[in-house]
Image (cartoon, grey):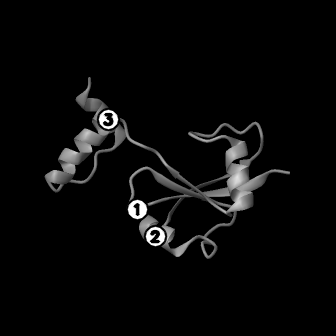
Amino acid sequence: MDRLVYVYKSRRKLRTFLYVPEKDVFSHIPSGLMDAFGAPEFVMVFALHKERKLQKITPEELTKALDEKGYLLRIDLESEEENMLNQESARRGLPPLEKEQISDYFH
């Protein structure tokens, strides 16, 4: 049987995602993590099975995390170029650039 997984993104941390087994249930997640993550923004729900292709993680890693902790926190690290551009944006008081905007700088 497939299991449903709900994915949320952080409004505070760019490229930070939280995978949970129940929609809008965060009571089992450490309060410090939720404070840093901020108000979760629902992104999607999907059925998890062995053949499922996921970005940055395997179905086995996700299953293990959900079984053991009840959640998985995924933080996508930026490339060096993205990081440098976003550091400059932050220094100027501008919002971080999205990946599509960054790729425009290199074409």
Query: Residue 47, position in %: x, y?
Result: 73, 50
- Residue for badge 2: 39
Q: Is residue 33 left or right of residue 27?
A: left
Residue type marked 3: Glu
The residue shown at (23%, 40%) is 85
Query: Residue 52, position in %: x, y?
Result: 71, 39
- Residue for badge 3: 80
Q: Are marks 2 and 3 in contact (CB under 8 Å)?
A: no
Query: Residue 15, position in %: x, y?
Result: 43, 50
Which of the two marks, 2 or 3, is nearer to us in this view?
3
- Residue for badge 1: 11
- Helix, strand or loop status at disc 2: loop
Instruction: Note whether 7 is above or below 30 in the view shown.
Output: above
Residue type marked 1: Arg
Find residue 1 and name its label.
Answer: none
Q: Earlier in the sequence, mark 1 or mark 3?
A: 1
Label 3 Cα crowd, 10 Å radius (few <14 / some 14-19 / many 20+): few
The residue shown at (38%, 62%) is 12
Tell me the CA gap for discs 2 and 1. 7 Å
Choose between 73 and 98: the one closer to the eye. Answer: 73
Label 2 Cα crowd, 10 Å radius (few <14 / some 14-19 / many 20+): few
